[in-house]
Image (cartoon, rainbow, N blue to C red):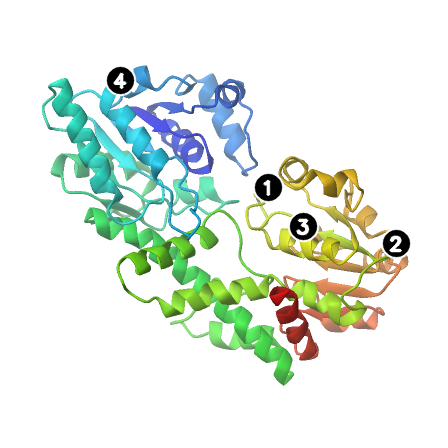
Amino acid sequence: MNIAVIGCGYVGLVTGACLAATGNSVTCIDSDAQKVAQLRLGLLPFFEPGLEPLVQRHVQQRQLHFSAEPGPAIAAADLVFIAVGTPPLAHGDADVRQVLEVADAVGRHMAAGCIVACKSTVPVGTAERIKAALDRAAKQRGLAPDHAVVANPEFLREGGAVQDFMSPDRVVIGLEDARAERVMRSVHAPFLERPAQLLVMGLRDAELTKYAANAMLATRISFMNEMARLCDALGVDVEQLRRGIGADARIGQSYLHPGCGYGGSCFPKDVRALLAMGRAARTDLDLVAAVAHVNDLQKQWAAGVIASRFGHRLQGRRFAVWGLAFKPGTDDLREAPALALISDLLAAGGRVCAHDPAAMPRARREWPQHWFDSGALQLAVSPLDAVDGADALVLMTEWALFSEPDFGEIRRRLRGSLIVDGRNRYDPARLRALGFDYAGVGRGAAAASVKACAESTLAA
């Protein structure tokens, strides 16, 4: 099948490479000519495990192509995927202008019978707007009205996107056309162990399913972070609480790990967009609003711990931060909790030396340049180099590299003794026996004043 994928970001590139792996001829289109030139050489603009060799292999086999010119690829395509960004507007609404611009371009070039599937995360009703744009274009061009629109939201986790596409737990397609259903079933069949994994529903149903899924996962994270604050106040270990409730088959263990808040390109944006949809529909989403509020508060947790030990003025203090990306397996810094922590530490007069195995080049490009020019934020070539002379070590991203460090060497290199474990990866008893002042998320030993410090930091 000839397939065009418009947008060479995380979703578009993973979609294109995986579909090429099953024998389709795929052209990925992006308006950034420099990005296209790099992709033709097999060089990716971001880090995603397993994706670069997949792209390189299928470029070499001439099953995967890249272009900055949409017309020819769209005209030759049986199926077009829209996978462009929908960044948040000022009040949280998803900006769908790129999606609709792409729909207009598809309408100008598509062949009769083309099927257009939207993988971008879009508000309810967007597929109908895409269909209207295609209908107008077909009428102007004198084409038969036999094209179709599909809502095909993605459920790809950064750091595991290739695996998620190749072995999905479900594929959601929203449509109103029997032929489009047959085509979408055929395209996804190689990736499905059971036909029941493909869920067919209406256009609006599929669009809302994406937002509801991300909001549910964000809810579990915020719930556990709220429980962690209660655990600290009551002297309870949240890890024991997690084990106890996660053993219930109705609850399970997934997304029950407390930490320093969720980030990334999906959860924060999609929760806010869902709230915006609720406002537009005059429907209060109080629980979703609370999820966002708890996450905003939790991103101040690590800074609150540091303030409880050193005060709010940090001049002359130096802090080692392990992890910059919002999660392991990616270099994505969007709304990363580490950014919130570093901003707070620098604003209080502190200095930071950080290490991340993937995200440091992106941090230099995307974070405020004056942080680096002034030396307030430095990037270390190794985790231990970041620790040298620091007053405290803060774990912000649970990369495997940080799982079993040499704590004896860390103790020798640290000027202070505080370890702030923002992902609860270390054994509190072991670290305290080694002479560290250990603070974990909801580990029961933190004073209630830590919560007050976090709240005052957020308010400031």
Residue at 62 percent of width and 73 percent of height: 442
Q: How far from the left and from the top, in percent, is residue 148?
A: 17, 33
**Which residue in the structure is indicated by mark 2?**
389
- Dots 3, 4 in contact, CB < 8 A: no
Give the distance between the C-alpha atoms of the residues marked 4 and 2, in whole angstroms: 61 Å
Mark before the other along the chain sequence, 4 or 2: 4
Mark 3: which secondary structure?
A: loop
Q: Is residue 185 visible?
A: no
Q: Which residue is mark 4?
A: 76
Say whether residue 141 is visible: yes
**76 or 454: nearer the viewer:** 454
Using the numbered discs, state the Cα–Cα distance from disc 2 to disc 3 in whole angstroms: 18 Å
Q: Amino acid at mark 2?
A: Gly
Q: CA distance from mark 4 to mark 1?
A: 34 Å
Q: How many marks?
A: 4
Mark earlier in primary sequence (1, 2): 1
Q: Which mark, by number, is residue 323?
A: 3
User: Disc 3 versus disc 4: distance between alpha carbons?
Assistant: 44 Å
CA–CA distance in space, label 1 to label 3 = 10 Å
- Taking the image as shown, residue 120 lies to the left or right of residue 229, namely left
Q: Residue furthest bottom?
A: 234
In what quadrant of the picture does the N terminus appear? top left
Query: Looking at the image, is mark 2 or mark 3 earlier in the sequence?
Result: 3
Q: Which residue is mark 1?
A: 331
Is mark 1 in CB contact (under 8 Å) with mark 3?
Answer: no
Farthest top residue?
A: 72
